[in-house]
Image: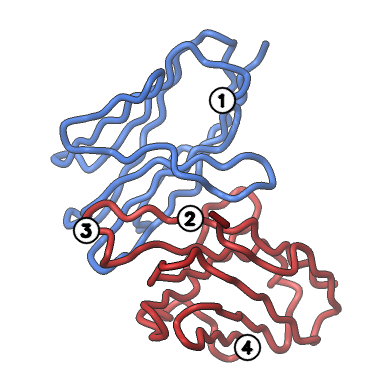
Amino acid sequence: RKEVEQDPGPFNVPEGATVAFNCTYSNSASQSFFWYRQDCRKEPKLLMSVYSSGNEDGRFTAQLNRASQYISLLIRDSKLSDSATYLCVVTHTGNQFYFGTGTSLTVIP
Amino acid sequence: EAGVVQSPRYKIIEKKQPVAFWCNPISGHNTLYWYLQNLGQGPELLIRYENEEAVDDSQLPKDRFSAERLKGVDSTLKIQPAELGDSAVYLCASSLGILAGGFDEQFFGPGTRLTVL
């Protein structure tokens, strides 16, 4: 079983729409959780960390559900510039990072 | 401040040839990672260094891949001999590691896109 599983999409949504991605992880001892963004032919970059209490950064909201072992990312009022691949990342002890396959998002004018 | 630097950005070689990639992490970052990323997939860890020590190389195909991080700074990843299936993007990342004291963000370099013909 993979450490991190994501729906690869693609998600094609119109501008202004709200879109949500989910990600599940297999190790209940996972410690830290992140969403990274990767533009086409570019390197991944941190979008936001995911805290147990949930956190929001502008139009982006991340949630963590430890009991069900999933994290989510909600994007409100989608912009064309949000088009990218969103990678779910989970860490274990000792700086072991595990990446999901990524979810592709295209925001359509 | 300079980010993670990698070279070359692109490399095209014939199968059975050797190839090497170089990475210079962000200054002060103790932890260095080499990842392989295939199209449509997330990065997959090849090796992780804490300073100059390789602490996780369980996914590194040791029959053909080797890596080193001399003096705990720059790192090189080598493939010898390369196979067709090695065509991918090789990403280097660095982080503060244990110095982060909490959430440890990884910073990625631009990657080396390898094509094996």
Q: Amino acid at mark 4?
A: Arg
Where on the picture, by quarter, is residue B58? bottom left
Q: Kindly indicate whether the residue at mark 4 contacts the one at mark 3 (C-beta within 8 angstroms).
A: no
Relative placement, left or right, of A42 versus A44 is: right
Instruction: Kindly state the secondary structure of the residue where label 1 is placed.
Output: helix
Looking at the picture, how far across and down is residue A43, in whole percent? 59, 50
Q: Which residue is mark 1?
A: A82
The chain to which mark 3 is attached is B
User: Which chain does blue denote in the image?
Assistant: A
State whether discs 4 and 1 lie on one chain: no
Of tags 4 and 1, the one toward the viewer is: 1
Looking at the picture, how far across and down is residue A18, in whole percent? 44, 13
Instruction: Kindly state the secondary structure of the residue where label 3 is placed.
Output: loop
Of tags 3 and 4, the one toward the viewer is: 3
Looking at the picture, how far across and down is residue A100, in whole percent? 44, 49
Q: Residue at x 60, y 81 (%)?
A: B76
Q: Amino acid at mark 2?
A: Phe
Q: Residue at x 29, y 46 (%)?
A: A33
Tag 3: Cα neighbours inside 10 Å, few (<14), some, or many (≥20)?
A: few
Pick whichever, B101 or A25, lies toward us.
B101
Q: Which residue is mark 4?
A: B64
Q: Kindly indicate whether the residue at mark 3 contacts the one at mark 2 (C-beta within 8 angstroms).
A: no
**Residue at mark 1 to residue at mark 2: CA–CA distance:** 20 Å
Does B29 sit above or below residue A100?
Answer: below
Of tags 1 and 2, the one toward the viewer is: 2
Q: Amino acid at mark 3?
A: Gly
Q: Residue at x 27, y 65 (%)?
A: B99
**Residue at mark 1 to residue at mark 3: CA–CA distance:** 31 Å
Relative placement, left or right, of A74 versus A51 is: right
Q: Which residue is mark 3?
A: B101
Identify the mark at residue B107; answer none if there is no mark. Answer: 2
Q: Kindly indicate whether the residue at mark 1 contacts the one at mark 4 (C-beta within 8 angstroms).
A: no
